[in-house]
């Protein structure tokens, strides 16, 4: 072996960056190495000594996002030319055997570079010492033109094309297994493992209990053996859907046994996906066989220091076992244990023949991982209709283990994949989702008997069904999140499933226990049915408002908290639910003394509430507050400031809303008659804020009601400039408005006041005709037309333009225009207005 790496270059950091998850960092590290090689800072012999570099370069193609593939392949090809590298290439035997298949298929590189690397790798064996030479059945190069069956990301099917001895028959292709053209599976089948007659006899004669399978058989054989020879697995699956015998004990044992098997299978999958698995250095002290698994006895012995399983104590062979923990350090070398051809033991291979003659037929009968997982879901889900807590918990455990494999194996591209295997898997998953929807409806509390007098109503059933509902909810979320993205859920989620999802989002207990799952379901609901989602949002808003109402009512009873900002926020939040609970104490407990700006908005919403009963309740509460604080008893107290407590309604908007409401006449009357009960500043403020609402207020003028006479009293024509009254201009405007009243007596009173204004007008004696000489007995109907005209009638579009009207008006008001022209302009204006 040559010298080690140069000490003045930090190669370890570069090699570490070559395995970084960010493509940019990997590219910079690769460019750094290539640049050093180009400028002769390092040479090829410096790099070929480092096994870690080859691992990183081979792993380059397994990243979902990677670039510079040609540079990596050229570097590998360059390093393979170095003679000393021949001792390094066998260290990464597994990666070089199978990486070209994945590279060729995923990245569509030319065959030349890939074939060159693989050919040199094959030649390296001839350069190695003869003691380490492989057997005559050495691994042959795969045909890169056929889609390989492998479990590397982006590869389809098996780890690699299983080498065959001459005359053993042809292996099934990807098309034969239904995997051709499928790119949605990260893994479908395992590398084929051959068995000796002894192994086959043990497996075929295993008719013992399920406990024996779990404790012995599944631990002593790799889990993939039972997919490649699926009789035992199929028997266990048949027990799930078969008739119930002996009170369901056999079914329960089958579920537990399948759960143990899925656990072993999951361990084997993780073992195969571990990079150390396919780049581990082989121990050449033994002769490799064409059916050896990628794990080696040397690495297994290093990692299996303390295995305490009774099933492996005393075993000396190094074949992989069902739990993924290969090797045995028991130290027993007596040779009493049997050998197996599944592993690397040469004695086992020479002692007994292997089943090469059955391989092609067996491979057609094997179960792929998608088939196995979908069959477990299909057979196990109907068992959840039971009310037996034990079977329910065991089935849920089995389903979660199975979903671990499904999530690790299937990509979201399943729903668009048109291959036969993908279509079969997608159909089975959709059927499983529909079964889950039916089960969720079955276990939902809305379908349970609610008659308390029913003797058959067992409270334990409610608890059991609730547990099953929660378990199914979690299962549903686990399937949807990684496998069914929002943009692909149409066509996957049926109307039946969408309906139960809509039901689940309203389950308050589930939302508090599993808030993330509820948000997930809401995302699908919003995407698939925006109408149902809008209903949920409105419902959730009302529920939150009800909660705030309860908190507000509790805080309102506390004197220290009733005027705090927190109480105000709760009061505002409680408004949305008022039409539903109609709790009138909410209105009476609302205090408006402080935070006027925020309370003003809330009070306006209450005063204009569309529900008449609530609106009347608000006016009643405000009237009670006004009468309490604007009373003779309160005003007679020395230094009383009780009138300040009604300041919250002294606002233009609030007074306008009060006056508009017909039900508030008593409140308005009390305010108008409370001049002496208010402070002068507060009264003047009220008159100022009342100016906007005066036109509407004066429409209530009457000689019969207290409110009407109070309004007429405000229009008295006595000459006064007191700030406690409205201005003379407002009084004149109010008088003219009363001239439009439907009540003749009100118009007569208004005419008297109008006569006073015109008679006492400054310079009135110089105006013609003289008003005092006119007969005003019939002027009460001056502004009343004989034929009322509805403002709702559409009189049609006028033939006159607005601009023309303004021009005529400008002529009439101009000082420099001749009087005759002005008279003509007035005539035209009269015609336009008609």
Image (cartoon, rainbow, N blue to C red):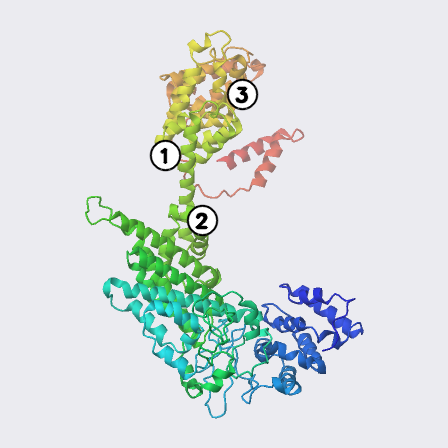
Quarter holding residue 657: top left
- In this view, 606 is above or below 361: above
Looking at the image, which is closer to me, 709 or 646?
Answer: 646
Label 1 packing within 10 angstroms: few (<14), some (14-19), many (20+): few
Element type at marker 2?
A: helix
Q: Residue at x 24, y 46 (%)?
A: 450
Determine the residue positioned at 39% across, 67% down.
215
- Give left or right: position of 502 versus 13: left
Residue 611 is tagged as 1
- Pick out the residue farthest to the front: 334
Upstream in sequence: badge 1 or badge 2: 2
Residue sitting nearer the eye, 562 or 586: 562
Q: Residue at position x 19%, y 44% from top? A: 453
Label pair 1/3, CB-CB below 8 angstroms: no
Q: Position of residue 64 (x, y in %)?
A: 58, 68
Q: Between label 1 and label 3, give the one nearer the viewer.
A: 1
Q: How many marks?
A: 3
Does the CB distance between marks 1 and 2 fall below 8 Å?
Answer: no
Is residue 770 in sight in this rendering? Answer: no
Q: Residue 536: x, y in percent?
A: 40, 48
Name the mark on residue 515. Answer: 2
Q: Residue at x 37, y 48 (%)?
A: 507
> In the image, 438: left or right of 107?
left
Q: Which residue is mark 3?
A: 688
Q: Quadrant where the N terminus lies? A: bottom right
Closer mark to the observer between disc 2 and disc 3: 2
Q: CA distance from mark 2 to mark 3?
A: 54 Å
Mark 1 and mark 3 lie on one chain; the one further toward the N terminus is 1
Which percent across, then down, holds residue 723? 55, 13
Instruction: Select label 1 or label 2 by which is in front.
Output: 2
Let me know if residue 10 appears in the view.
yes
């Amino acid at each position: 072996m040559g010298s080690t790496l140069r000490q003045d270059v930090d190669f370890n950091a570069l090699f570490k960056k070559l395995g970084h998850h960010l493509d940019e960092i990997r590219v910079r590290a690769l460019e750094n190495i290539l640049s050093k090689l180009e400028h002769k800072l390092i040479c090829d012999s410096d790099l070929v000594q480092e096994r870690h570099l080859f691992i990183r370069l081979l792993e380059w193609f397994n990243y979902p996002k990677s670039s510079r593939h040609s540079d990596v392949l050229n570097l590998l090809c360059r390093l393979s030319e170095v003679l000393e590298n021949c001792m390094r290439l066998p260290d990464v035997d597994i990666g070089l055997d199978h990486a070209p298949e994945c590279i060729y298929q995923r990245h569509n590189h030319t065959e030349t570079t890939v074939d060159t690397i693989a050919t040199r790798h094959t030649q390296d064996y001839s350069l190695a010492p003869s003691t380490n030479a492989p057997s005559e059945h050495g691994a042959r190069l795969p045909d890169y033109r056929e889609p390989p069956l492998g479990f590397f990301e982006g590869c389809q099917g098996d780890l690699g094309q299983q080498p065959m001895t001459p005359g053993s028959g042809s292996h099934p292709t990807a098309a034969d297994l239904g995997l051709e053209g499928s790119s949605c599976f990260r893994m479908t089948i395992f590398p084929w493992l051959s068995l000796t007659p002894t192994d086959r006899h043990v497996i075929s004669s295993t008719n013992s209990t399920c406990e024996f399978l779990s404790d012995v058989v599944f631990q002593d054989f790799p889990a993939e053996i039972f997919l490649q020879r699926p009789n035992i697995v199929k028997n266990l699956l048949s027990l799930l859907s078969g008739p119930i015998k002996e009170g369901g004990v056999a079914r329960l044992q089958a579920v537990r046994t399948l759960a143990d098997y899925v656990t072993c299978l999951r361990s084997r999958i993780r073992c195969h996906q571990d990079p150390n698995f396919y780049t581990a250095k082989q121990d050449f002290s033994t002769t490799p066989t064409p059916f050896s698994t990628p794990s080696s006895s040397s690495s297994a012995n290093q990692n299996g220091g303390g295995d305490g399983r009774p099933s492996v104590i005393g075993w000396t062979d190094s074949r992989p076992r069902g739990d993924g923990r290969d090797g045995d350090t028991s130290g027993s070398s007596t040779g009493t244990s049997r050998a197996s051809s599944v592993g690397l033991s040469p004695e086992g291979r020479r002692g007994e023949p292997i089943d090469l003659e059955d391989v092609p037929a067996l491979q057609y009968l094997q179960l792929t991982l998608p088939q196995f997982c979908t069959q477990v879901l299909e057979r196990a889900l109907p068992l959840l209709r039971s009310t037996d807590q034990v079977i329910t918990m065991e089935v849920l455990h089995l389903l979660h283990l199975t979903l671990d494999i499904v999530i690790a194996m299937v990509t979201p591209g399943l729903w668009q994949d048109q291959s036969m295997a993908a279509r079969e898997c997608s159909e089975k998953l959709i059927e499983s989702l529909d079964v889950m929807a039916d089960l969720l409806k079955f276990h939902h509390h809305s379908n349970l008997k609610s008659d308390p007098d029913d003797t058959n109503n067992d409270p334990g059933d409610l608890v059991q069904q609730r547990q099953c509902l929660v378990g199914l909810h979690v299962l549903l979320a686990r399937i949807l999140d990684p496998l069914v993205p929002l943009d692909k859920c149409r066509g996957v989620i049926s109307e039946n499933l969408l309906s139960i999802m809509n039901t689940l989002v309203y389950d308050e207990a589930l939302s508090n226990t599993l808030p993330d799952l509820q948000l997930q379901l809401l995302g699908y609901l919003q995407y698939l049915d925006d109408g149902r989602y809008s209903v949920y949002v409105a419902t959730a808003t009302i529920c939150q408002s009800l909660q705030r109402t309860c908190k507000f009512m509790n805080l309102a009873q506390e004197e220290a908290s009733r005027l705090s900002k927190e109480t105000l926020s709760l009061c505002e939040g409680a408004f949305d639910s008022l039409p539903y609970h109609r709790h009138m104490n909410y209105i009476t407990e609302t205090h408006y003394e402080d935070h006027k700006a925020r309370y003003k908005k809330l009070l306006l919403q209450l005063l204009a509430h569309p529900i008449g009963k609530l609106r009347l309740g608000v006016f009643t509460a405000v009237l009670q507050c006004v009468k309490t604080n604007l009373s003779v008893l309160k005003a007679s107290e020395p230094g009383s400031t009780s009138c300040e407590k009604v300041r919250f309604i002294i606002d233009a908007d609030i007074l306008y809303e009060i006056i508009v409401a017909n039900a508030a006449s008593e409140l308005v009357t009390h305010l108008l008659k409370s001049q002496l009960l208010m402070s002068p500043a507060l009264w003047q403020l009220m008159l100022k804020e009342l100016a906007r609402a005066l036109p509407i207020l004066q429409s209530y003028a009457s000689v019969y009601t207290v409110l009407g006479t109070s309004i007429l009293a405000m229009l008295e024509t006595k000459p006064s400039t007191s700030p406690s009254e409205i201005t003379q201009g407002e009084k004149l405007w109010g008088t003219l408005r009363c001239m439009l009243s439907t009540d003749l007596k009100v118009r007569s009173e208004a005419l008297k006041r109008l006569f006073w204004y015109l008679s006492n007008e400054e310079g009135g004696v110089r105006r013609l005709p003289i008003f005092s000489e006119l007969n005003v007995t019939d002027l009460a109907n001056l502004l009343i037309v004989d034929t009322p005209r509805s403002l709702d009638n559409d009189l049609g579009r006028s033939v006159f333009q607005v601009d023309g009207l303004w021009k005529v008006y400008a002529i009439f008001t101009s000082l420099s225009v001749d009087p005759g022209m002005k008279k003509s302009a007035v005539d035209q204006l009269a015609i336009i207005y008609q």
